[in-house]
């Protein structure tokens, strides 16, 4: 059985790498769309589809070749992994971090401020008594440092991390008013 058919040996290799490229570009493009970067995502979309059409054309031309089909599917799967690695490295966007500490003597918010984190503190009451709730909005690339600092200060703190879709208004790096606005909205939703 001839797996290659009349196909030249390098066509499956081109299909494989084209799929890696277009799927990786697609992953990054979606992150940019979610982050509100219209022009960058539009340009990436152009190249993503251009590469995809070439890859699909290579498969359709060689539809009877199992090697071309495997190259297409393998390139897609590899592209998903490569796209995730790229997305992890560029770490676009912001995250909302909520840390709940049951040990009021620790003063989690104060100690995080000493480590140059912007924090809004809310005193709350949990099942077993008073709790401190620390609200933070941070750039995604700074998330690991923040969570490491929280764990070092209060290893028993409960963390909840969510995506902050396109925060607007004040500068994320310098203005704590954004945190107060977020906390105000969160508290008004509870009522």
Image (cartoon, rainbow, N blue to C red):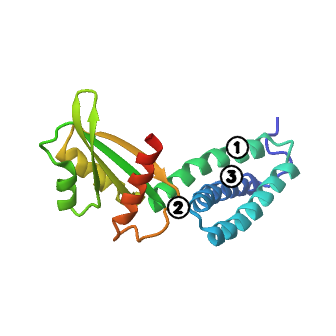
Q: Which residue is mark 2?
A: 166
Q: Are marks 1 and 3 in contact (CB under 8 Å)?
A: no
Dot 1 or dot 2, earlier in sequence? 1
Measuring from the top left, give residue 170's x and y in whole percent: 42, 70
Q: Secondary structure at mark 1?
A: helix
User: Which residue is situated farthest in the front direction here?
Assistant: 191
Q: Residue at x 71, y 46 (%)?
A: 71
Q: Which secondary structure lies at badge 2?
A: loop
- Residue 116: percent from the left, percent from the top? 23, 64
Judging by the rendered image, the residue that carries numbered circle 3 is 16
Say whether disc 3 or disc 2 marks the residue closer to the N-terminus.
Answer: 3
- Identify the residue shown where x is 73% and y is 51%: 12
For the C terminus, the quadrant is top left
The residue tagged 1 is: 73
Q: Is residue 126 left or right of residue 43?
A: left
In the picture, the quarter occupied by the N terminus is: top right
């Amino acid at each position: 059985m001839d797996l290659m058919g009349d196909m030249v040996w390098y066509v499956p290799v081109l299909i494989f790498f084209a799929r890696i490229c277009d799927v990786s570009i697609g992953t990054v493009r979606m992150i940019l769309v979610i982050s509100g970067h219209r022009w960058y995502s539009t340009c990436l979309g152009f190249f993503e589809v251009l590469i995809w059409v070439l890859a699909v054309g290579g498969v359709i031309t060689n539809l009877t070749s199992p090697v071309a089909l495997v190259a297409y599917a393998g390139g897609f799967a590899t592209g998903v992994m490569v796209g995730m690695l790229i997305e992890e490295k560029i770490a676009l966007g912001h995250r909302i971090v909520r840390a709940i500490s049951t040990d009021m003597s620790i003063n989690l918010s104060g100690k995080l401020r000493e480590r140059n984190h912007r924090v809004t503190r809310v005193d709350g009451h949990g099942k077993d008594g008073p709790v401190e709730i620390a609200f933070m909005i941070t750039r995604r690339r700074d998330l690991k440092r923040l969570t490491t600092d929280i764990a070092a200060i209060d290893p028993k703190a409960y963390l909840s991390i969510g995506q902050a879709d396109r925060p607007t208004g004040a500068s994320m790096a310098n203005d704590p008013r954004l945190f107060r606005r977020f906390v105000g909205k969160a508290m008004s939703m509870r009522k």
